[in-house]
């Protein structure tokens, strides 16, 4: 009875806590973990979040200028005899174009420059390194009229 009066009830809880801590210190709190079995010889780093760049300012002072506009693509029309024959017989205009220009770019350039629609574009690179484009016009347009407008004939 005297013992209970001398030590309040909260000391009993503290004593139990101390015993638990002593046991944990002796045995350790972590139980042994099983080792992960690797079935592959390769180690791939885990994929993490990749955020898109948001620069504070542009690293380029002036925006890039399109080097291949319609004036750069179409260099000049050809006026050889064979080119004239193509104009008369096949409804086709013949141009020397930039070597980097694709068929779709040539079509777009002709449409912008002369306001005509093309049916088909054939290209070849000549032995001297220049690219030649045969631009076939749709039936709505006459190559002779367009050639006159351009100033070939």
Image: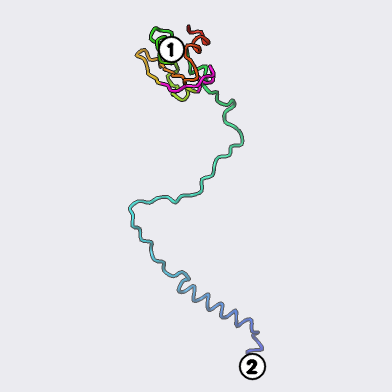
The span from disc 2 to disc 1 (Cα, nearest Å) is 125 Å
- Is residue 109 one of those drawn in magenta? yes
Instruction: Give me the residue at 65% from left, 87% from top.
Output: 6
Frontmost residue, 115 versus 9: 115
Frontmost residue, 46 versus 142: 142
Q: Earlier in the sequence, mark 2 or mark 1?
A: 2
- Is residue 128 one of those drawn in magenta? no
Frontmost residue, 112 versus 117: 117
Instruction: Give me the residue at 44% from left, 51% from top.
Output: 46
Disc 1 is placed on an element classified as helix
What is the crowding at mark 2: few (fewer than 14 residues within 10 Å), some, or many (at least 20)? few
Residue assigned mark 2? 1
For discs 2 and 1, the disc positioned in front in the rendered view: 1
Residue 17, relative to residue 52: is it above or below?
Answer: below
What is the magenta range? 108-121
Q: Position of residue 18 (x, y in %)?
A: 55, 77
Q: Quadrant of residue 9?
A: bottom right
Q: Position of residue 114 (x, y in %)?
A: 53, 16
Give left or right: position of 140 versus 134: right
Residue assigned mark 1? 87
Give left or right: position of 74 versus 34: right
Frontmost residue, 39 versus 93: 93
């Amino acid at each position: 009875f005297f013992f209970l009066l001398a030590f309040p009830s909260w000391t009993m809880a503290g004593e139990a806590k101390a015993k638990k801590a002593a046991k944990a210190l002796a045995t350790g709190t972590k139980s042994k973990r099983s080792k992960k079995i690797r079935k592959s010889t390769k180690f791939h780093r885990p994929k993490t979040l990749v955020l898109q760049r948001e620069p504070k300012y542009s690293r380029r002072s002036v925006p890039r200028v399109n080097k291949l506009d319609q004036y750069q693509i179409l260099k000049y029309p050809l006026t050889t005899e064979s080119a004239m024959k193509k104009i008369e017989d096949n409804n086709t205009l013949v141009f020397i174009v930039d070597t980097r220009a694709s068929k779709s770019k040539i079509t777009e350039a002709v449409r912008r420059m002369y306001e005509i629609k093309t049916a088909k574009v054939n290209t070849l690179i000549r032995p001297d390194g220049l690219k030649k484009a045969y631009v076939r016009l749709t039936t709505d347009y006459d190559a002779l009229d367009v050639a006159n407008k351009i100033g070939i004939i």
